[in-house]
Amino acid sequence: MKLLTCPMNGTRPLSEFIFGGELREAPDQKTCTDAEWAAYVHNRHGAPGDKKEWWYHSPSGTWFIAERNTLTDKVTRTYLFGQKNLGEENVVEEESK
Amino acid sequence: MQALDIKTIVPISPVAHAQPRDSAKWDVVNNMEIAVEFANADIEQARKKVLGVTDVSCFERYGVKGPQASQWLADHELAIPSNPNSWTRCDQKTLVLRLGSSEFLVEDQLGGLASKKLANNTSRIAGVYKVPRADAAFILSGREVLNLFSELCSLDLRATSLLANDVIMTQVAGVSAIVLRQTINGEPVYRLWCDGTYGPYMWEVLIEIATELGGGAVGLASYQN
């Protein structure tokens, strides 16, 4: 069973979670060019590697960030958005058994 | 054509569609029609000791969230659990569940009035938002209850893992649910809430396993006395 740790609810089966896409910072609409905005809207960074992703724990309605290597599927950290610098208690590992 | 007065309509338990309409005894509790007796008292007592499943969707409930929700509940003299995912009892007749840092579920047990008082307060406070609740709610009792959960839930819900005041939000039978341990009339039981639209499904699953394990449906009347 694959497991993922919600920063609010603890370690749970992956079936309780919904993937919400990569965390991407939008360019400033007032200053960016049309090409930059079009790239943000239409293009995705598909190369495997370390990504920050939105995940949703559906039973509790908790959105959070998971740092995951999309090549190895290894999750190194999960935390609530805006709380990435909290202590080690928020560092979680994906496990399998 | 006669006008329909919505105030005269008595809501029915969200679980009712899965329950026997003819063989069970029904009553109106907290303005909701609910099954109060499925078999005679001796049979229901025996089921409760093995694995009893009771529909308590009629308990009054009130949900609230927002940055000022905690203070607002405290202003209404309700005890507030200090940590997310925990619960506390208030005046012995009301459960206050903290579902997150700023979201709460208040549920009156039989005879409790706190939820009704909160619902009657219609004043609008900044940072306090009502969360409409339409839960199917159950009491699970008896010595086989952990065997039931082992078939439906991937978490360890034994007393050593699920502490007395813990609230667990997880999936039960594939449905998002809230689970906690409680004591009613000195009897340790588990409580289960899920969305009301899943109520009939959840009831059927619970009753199927309960029956296999020697238990069954228990009416609300067994907790009213």
Image: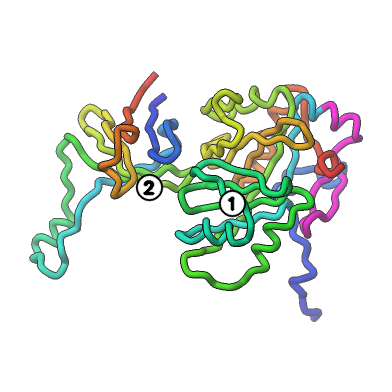
Residue drawn at x 23%, y 27% is A72
Q: Quadrant of residue B192?
A: top right
Q: In terms of secondary structure, where does tag 2 sit?
A: strand
Look at the picture and state if B206 lies above or below B98.
Answer: above
Judged left or right of residue B86, residue B61 is right
Q: Is the Cβ of the residue at disc 1 closer than 8 Å to that at disc 2? A: no
Q: Nearer the viewer, residue B120 or B91?
A: B91
Judged left or right of residue B166, residue A49 is left
Q: Quadrant of the N terminus of chain B?
A: bottom right
Residue A63 badge: 2
Q: Nearer the viewer, residue A74 or B203?
A: A74
Look at the picture and state if A2 lies above or below B175.
Answer: above
Is residue B158 covered in magenta? Answer: no
Judged left or right of residue B104, residue A33 is left
Which amino acid type is marked by label 2? Trp
Residue B201 badge: none
Q: Which residue is mark 1?
A: B105
Q: Nearer the viewer, residue B148 or A82?
A: A82
Residue drawn at x 14%, y 62% is A37
Q: Quadrant of the C terminus of chain B?
A: top right
Q: Which residue is at the far top?
A: A97
Residue drawn at x 21%, y 39% is A51
Q: Which residue is at the far bottom?
A: B1
Give the residues drawn in magenta, as a range.
B25-46
Look at the picture and state if A93 lies above or below B54.
Answer: above
Q: Position of residue B151 (x, y in %)?
A: 59, 25
Which amino acid type is marked by label 1? Leu
Q: Position of residue B160 (x, y in %)?
A: 57, 23
Chain letter of the residue carrying label 2: A
Q: What is the distance, in whole Å, between disc 1 and disc 2 at their CAs?
A: 20 Å
Residue B197 seen anywhere in this rendered image of the structure: no
